[in-house]
Image (tube, rainbow, N blue to C red):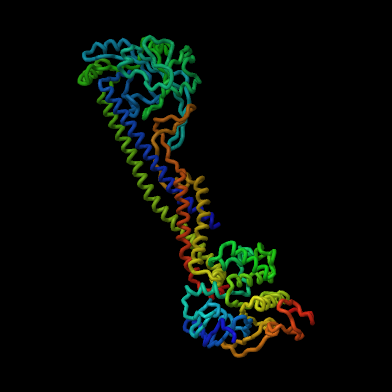
Amino acid sequence: MVIIALGFSMAIMISIPAGIVANQEATQSLTENFNNTMSNMQEQINKTATLIECRASSGQSMYPGAPSGRPPFGFGREEVFINETVGNEIRSIEGVKDVVPFLEKSSEETTSETINTPRGSFTISRPLYTITGVCLNSSFIDNYSVLPTNRTAGRNLCEGDSGVLLMSLNLTQYFGVAVGDTVQINGESFTVVGVYNSTGQGRTETRTVYMDLSDAQTITGETGNVSRFDVYADDVSDVDGIAEVINAAFSELTVTTYKDRLSQLQTTQEMYESTLENAQSTLDQTQATATQEIGVAVVATSLIVLFVMLYTVRERTREIGTFKAIGFSNWSVMSQFVLEGILISSVAGVVGIAIGSVAAPVLSSLLLPHVSLFGGSSQDRFGPVSGTTASQTAVASLNPQLVLLAFGVAILLGALGSLYPAWRAAKIRPAEAMRYE
Amino acid sequence: MSESILKTEKLIKIYEMGKRKIPALSGVDLQVNKGEFIAIMGPSGSGKTTLLNVLGCLDTATSGTMTLNGIDVAKLPEKKLYSIRRNEIGFIFQTFNLFPYLNARENVELPMECTKKSKGERRKRARGLLEMVGLSGREEHKPHKLSAGEQQRVAIARALANDPAIVLADEPTGNLDTENKHEIVRLLGRLNINQGTTIVMVTHDDQVASHTERILFLNDGKITREKQGLHLMKKKLICPHCGSRIQPTDVKCSSCRKKL
């Protein structure tokens, strides 16, 4: 009974640092994740300083966290298309260097996805993947980021390609295909020539197939239509003027420039900073709470050892008298009781570690506030999908250092708690001890 | 002249219960010679156990002198007394006071743990002592597996572990039946004759006391009277029952066949 009480106290003691470690790791991971995202976004914006994105839609991009202001896959995007000849008109504006057309359309197949939020879980249905048609002009491919570059197998698309596609890794796993295999997209057969990794650092995970623009227009029934133009200016100083002209001439296009994207970045940064601040504040709060709770657990453990050992000394008074009668010194008697205290708390330490290894997540979540991790918990049949606004909390678990530390603390508390009872045992006068009933 | 192993002069012990002072020993003058077997008798509250505790350095006298094996123990501080208890004194208690979680051999080895004897030497001596008290083959038994008489034999072996100058026994037969009582007294007698062990025994039992060579009567904290016991005759190799000559190793008298 005493061992279990001590073990439980030890388990609390071990669960609290486990919770702190989990929170520290969560905050660190949050910081790293945010820093990566910010640096990637900054890099992307710098690279595309001369880029004016013209999207055929009625509204502003609602997804500042996504790269290039594109919405994360499947989140309620309104699919609007525009005739590709508009591109020729834009090309004729002074200062425009190139106009690269894209067609992005959701697949007919859909998937259901479970999203976990602090308020509960819900399921949504969304398209399985996006078909992206790219104008495979070698000058576009060489000069601009029109195709993914982080390939894991096969080759990239090139000028003149038709009937072939570049597929994201998660989709190859879903379809069970590899480079060289054939896959049906909207009823047409395509050969997979390359696979790219869809989870880059700080980027949202996408499920996309890239193919020639004409092929995409044919299989989606959007012949002659595109969904977006990437307009490149000759110089950064021309960007504002070109954007103004496009805005005036084509009301059906939503124009996003370098400045807009910088503003979006700033908003994102502010949001991230606020999240980090919250995480840091939670961490500080956790550490303050943990200090108090560990203090209470240490005092409780020491008191249990103290009372157990005091009781033991009382119960064994005659035995102590006998020890002294046969020649044991005060020091021998004292060290024997301290050793017994250490033994009891060591056994309790093992019990505590056993309880803690099972109950640390529950105990630490009951005793400590926890840092919320941004994103990473939504799940569909492909596995976890990052980049959503869902959140999860840091989960405490024991590591070997914590286990060793806990065992060390158990021994120390055993020694501390039994010190006074052992001293009392040593001070008992043998004749009085022998009279004790 | 016999060599004195224990000598007290005007030994006084007063217990203080708040403001009340209760005298337990009121000037005990006692001399125990080497190789003697003495019984101390007296009514309840006469100070027998107090005297034994003071003689055994379990308690200190309020005043008076006490010399044990040439050491003036009355003036020694508590932290020095434990080595006197360990090396010079062996204790036998009425309730045996064996450690229940140790077996017979380990109980006997325990007083030797604070000495320089190696583990092997301790084990060998413990086995030898257990054999001497007639417990061969019972060395590995825990106390609860032994009879009361056997437990007291283990306690006697433990008292002899460090080859003490004197053995102090506090009512050693008090918790034993008649047969075991006589066995233990005879064992103590044999140890006294064969090993030359000096024994001071507190008892209230006339029969038990009669097996010693000198009986001291304690009354109101003072030795009031003294008489000879039958054991002296055994030491002079005369059967105390029929007066025939006996040998030191005899267990029974060859003439009257009575147990010695």
Residue B194 locus on image (x, y percent): 67, 76
Residue A123 locus on image (x, y percent): 47, 30
Report which quarter residue B235 is drawn in.
bottom right
Instruction: Please state which of residues A364 and B172 is positioned toward the viewer in this rendering.
Output: B172
Q: The N terminus of chain B appears in which quarter of the rendering?
A: bottom right
Reply above or below: A158 against B164: above
Reply above or below: A268 against A429: above
The answer, for residue A167, to whether it is visible in the render is: no
Residue farthest toward the bottom in the current orientation of the protein? B224
Reply above or below: B136 against A105: below
Say left or right for B46 vs A41. right
Residue A117 locus on image (x, y percent): 43, 35
Say left or right for A427 vs A32. right
Q: How many marks?
A: 0
Report which quarter residue B142 is drawn in.
bottom right
Q: For the point 23% across and 20% down, which residue is it?
A: A239
Residue B104 locus on image (x, y percent): 64, 65
Q: For the point 75% across and 86% down, which residue is it?
A: B243
Reply above or below: A326 against A236: below
The answer, for residue A271, to whether it is visible in the render is: yes
Q: The C terminus of chain B appears in which quarter of the rendering?
A: bottom right
Instruction: Please state which of residues A211 and A195 is positioned toward the viewer in this rendering.
Output: A195
Instruction: Please state which of residues B245 and A9 is positioned toward the viewer in this rendering.
Output: B245
Say left or right for A395 vs A268. right
Report which quarter residue A392 is drawn in.
top left
Q: For the point 31% across and 10% down, which residue is it?
A: A85
